[in-house]
Image (tube, helix red, strand yellow):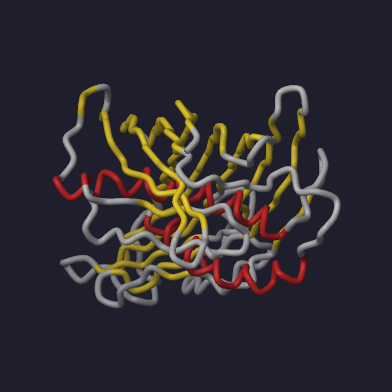
């Protein structure tokens, strides 16, 4: 979703300076990623977004850039949509997604301007998995099973408003992280990262009807768009993510990951920009589910 990608990349620079001060050197970090140039990784992703079911593969390789920094580079292939093969635009063959779990590097936003729109969901969802694990590594506070840390996002609410069609588009989110298990016998650790509404999201809620909580927490999502008839499509709601990532203790690569992303909104069509003359409220609920598993891996 558009709000997701804007959120991730507007916040990531703010994490860097904060987390450098939080990181500690001992005990050892069970989530540490040990890179080897030439290592190949393959992931299979399944997604459910309302009525749309898709599957797609990401084929990757570990590389080292001119500065000596390791990164993972992926190509997206073999997409199916609702059980049928889905052709991607020719540009998909040339697109490469760069990701990293190295806490000494800051993740960079992918260029989505030329990708097939059907790939945006898989690309941003994979970036969520990597960014969540990267943040846990960067903070360095999850050392043993049941360790917990609540990270208050230092960035202001992110915006995807373009000023023309979308006049207001903002969301706010904090991170609630737990190292659920460290299983030496299985060679894995599991970390849960919950993206949750802040206690005071500080969103620009223009009308009184927007103040009432839509879900069980504070409203952390708002959008106001102007349609072709000059009316205002306004919505407010709560969005959360629950991300579970299984990590290899051997080298820190992602062995598997799941995401549940419920979005609950109240939407109204309004006659005025103040949102005081509006039609009936319509409740809209979405539950996206994403599953990613690793396939064959090989060394250099």
12, above or below 238, in the image: below
Looking at the picture, tell me which residue is in the foreground, 7 or 86: 86
Farthest right residue? 27
120, above or below 39, in the image: below
From the top left corner, tell me how far across and down residue 28 is, in percent.
80, 48
Res. 231 image quadrant:
bottom left
From the top left corner, tell me how far across and down residue 294 is, in percent.
49, 30
Q: Residue at x 22, y 46 (%)?
A: 92
Farthest front residue? 300
93, above or below 181, in the image: below
Seen in the image, is 140 located left or right of residue 126? right
From the top left corner, tell me how far across and down residue 101 is, in percent.
57, 52
Res. 23 image quadrant:
bottom right
Seen in the image, is 11 located left or right of residue 92? right
Res. 134 image quadrant:
bottom right
Seen in the image, is 137 located left or right of residue 35? right
Q: Residue at x 47, y 38 (%)?
A: 300
Image label count: 0
From the top left corner, tell me how far across and down residue 82 is, in percent.
27, 26
Q: Residue at x 47, y 74 (%)?
A: 206
Q: Residue at x 40, y 53 (%)?
A: 281
């Amino acid at each position: 979703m558009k709000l997701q990608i804007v959120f991730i990349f507007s916040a990531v620079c703010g994490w860097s300076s904060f987390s450098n001060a939080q990181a500690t050197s001992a005990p050892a970090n069970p989530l540490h990623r040990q890179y080897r140039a030439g290592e190949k990784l393959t992931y299979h992703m399944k997604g459910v977004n309302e009525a749309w079911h898709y599957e797609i593969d990401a084929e990757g390789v570990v590389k080292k850039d001119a500065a000596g920094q390791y990164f993972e580079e992926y190509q997206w292939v073999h997409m199916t949509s609702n059980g049928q093969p889905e052709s991607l635009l020719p540009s998909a063959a040339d697109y490469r997604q760069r990701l990293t779990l190295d806490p000494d590097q800051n993740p960079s936003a992918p260029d989505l301007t030329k990708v097939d729109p059907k790939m945006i969901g898989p690309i941003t969802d994979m970036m969520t998995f990597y960014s969540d694990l990267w943040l846990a590594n960067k903070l360095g506070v999850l050392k043993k099973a049941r360790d917990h840390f609540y990270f208050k996002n230092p960035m202001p609410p992110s915006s995807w408003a373009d000023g023309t069609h979308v006049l207001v588009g903002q969301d706010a989110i904090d991170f609630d992280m737990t190292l659920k298990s460290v299983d030496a016998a299985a060679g894995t650790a599991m970390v849960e990262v919950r993206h949750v509404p802040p206690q005071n999201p500080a969103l620009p809620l223009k009308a009184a009807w927007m103040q009432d909580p839509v879900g069980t927490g504070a409203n952390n999502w708002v959008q106001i768009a102007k349609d072709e008839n000059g009316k205002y499509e306004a919505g407010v709601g709560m969005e959360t993510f629950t991300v579970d990532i299984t990590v290899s203790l051997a080298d820190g690569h992602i062995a598997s990951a799941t995401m549940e992303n419920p979005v609950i909104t109240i939407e109204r069509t309004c006659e005025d920009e103040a949102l005081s003359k509006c039609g009936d409220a319509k409740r809209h609920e979405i539950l996206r589910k994403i599953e990613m598993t690793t396939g064959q891996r090989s060394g250099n």
